[in-house]
Amino acid sequence: MKSIINLEDMTVKQGRTGTIHFTVTDENNNNMNGKTVIKFNQKTFLTGKVVDGLFSKECDFSDFGNDSYEMTVIFAGNDTCNASKADAILYIDKSISRYGDNGKLNSKIIINDFNVRQDQLETMAFKVKDMDNNPISGKVTVKLNDKTFIMGHVVNGLFSEKIDFSNLRNNTYNMTVLFGGNEKCNPSSTSVKLFVKQDKKFLRANKMDSKIDLKDFTVKKGAKKRVEFTITDENGEPVSGKVVMKINKKTFLRGKAVDGIFSEEADFSNLNNDSYDVTVLFGGNMDCDPASIDVKLYIDKTKDIELSIHDIQNASYRLCKWIEINKRLPGKIAINKEKITIGSLLSVLTNTIKNIRDNNTGIVISGRAKTPKVSSESIAEVELIPFEDYMDIVEKVSSYIAENREAPSTIESSYGNIGFMNLVYTSAKIVANSSSTGLLSSVYVRPWKKIVAK
């Protein structure tokens, strides 16, 4: 039966708490029970339970700084009703009232975006007043890109100090000013932009180190692959600039890192050796010196696994039954007379789930993956995981295998860490109980210790 979420747009005062409230009924207007997930801008914010058709919980929205957020509520379904989803808008009310909840006058900071020169002292000045426009005094903190830059005092409504900006290298900073309040007035904060005019001579003499973050990687023989890595400065901030990749000392690929990310599709089909020496060179920029890194490229010459969805579903059913009877995971499984390791089977299962999601009913092609030596898990209770969330887990597993050619020992989720052995069992359960044209709307995930308990 269909479930219905009754959800309306909501408004919360900036920096305050607010109550998330909605009801869930079936199509006959009967109250429902079950697990629910609340997301803002597609990120999980809260999980909970609908009891007798009602979910109501007071939540802290103090970190929500945008004017509005897309709100998504997912009901996981139950024995009588299917899963469902509803969307609404969360509005953040940024208007300032004269008095706070504690009876004190609210305060306001009066400051505009401003420009400074990097090579000299500049005066930073702003005003702080109460809501009756009277000047007030107290402690202030100024942060640049969320890091404390200076601390000082407002006296009779005015902050004015000479500041040394010579260590600032970026062109633009997000500047947040925080007033700590006093006996009569509440704290307040505001954000503006700080624009730094950079001196080229100064920059050339004071460049930062840069770092390329790239590990050894593997490419399938005869295949194309997207080469991706990050480049940061010595403070971990992303940098941009020209990049060259060399294989066995010969230039193989040229491109640019943009906002710290290099991402280019490359054709490796002419590489036939087992491995190659790779050198990546970053050319530097006005802020950072050049950098280089040496890694290994391995060519995977193993044959892909090719199976029909029907054969994989039969094998998944047999595997689930075998685990439930023998209370352990086998080392290998035979499918069409081919013995497949359990690490490779997880690769097959995740690719099968993605193919069914994409309505691709053809042959499932999967690379092989090593089986991890450990399986680490933290979930302690049975969890009902809706389609959107278990697909997130499947994508994480698939990405890990593609990058490492090994199955993960654990995957983090909002429900807890799920270990390798449980990933295999749960993925097999999804495949075994789905049709070739449609996946389960949700799946129960049990702790592995409970699955194999005798």
Image (cartoon, rainbow, N blue to C red):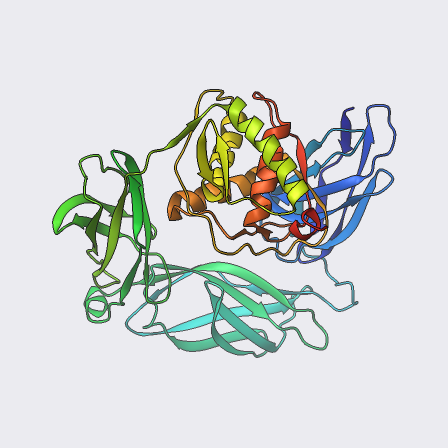
Q: Nearer the viewer, residue 452 or 261?
A: 452
Q: How many marks?
A: 0
Pinpoint residue 424: horizontal percent, then vertical percent. Answer: 56, 42
Pinpoint residue 119: horizontal percent, then vertical percent. Answer: 28, 72
287 over 89 or under it: above or below: below
Q: Is residue 94 left or right of residue 346?
A: right
Q: Quadrant of residue 30?
A: top right
* Residue at 70% in and 54% down: 380
Is any atom of residue 263 visible in this view? no
* Residue at 61% in and 22% down: 435
Q: Is residue 346 left or right of residue 131?
A: left
Q: Quadrant of residue 215?
A: bottom left
Q: In the rendered view of the protein, which quadrant contains the N terminus?
A: top right
44 over 378 or under it: above or below: above
Pinpoint residue 197: horizontal percent, then vertical percent. Answer: 30, 62
* Residue at 51% in and 35% down: 349
Q: Nearer the viewer, residue 341 or 46?
A: 341
182 over 112 or under it: above or below: below
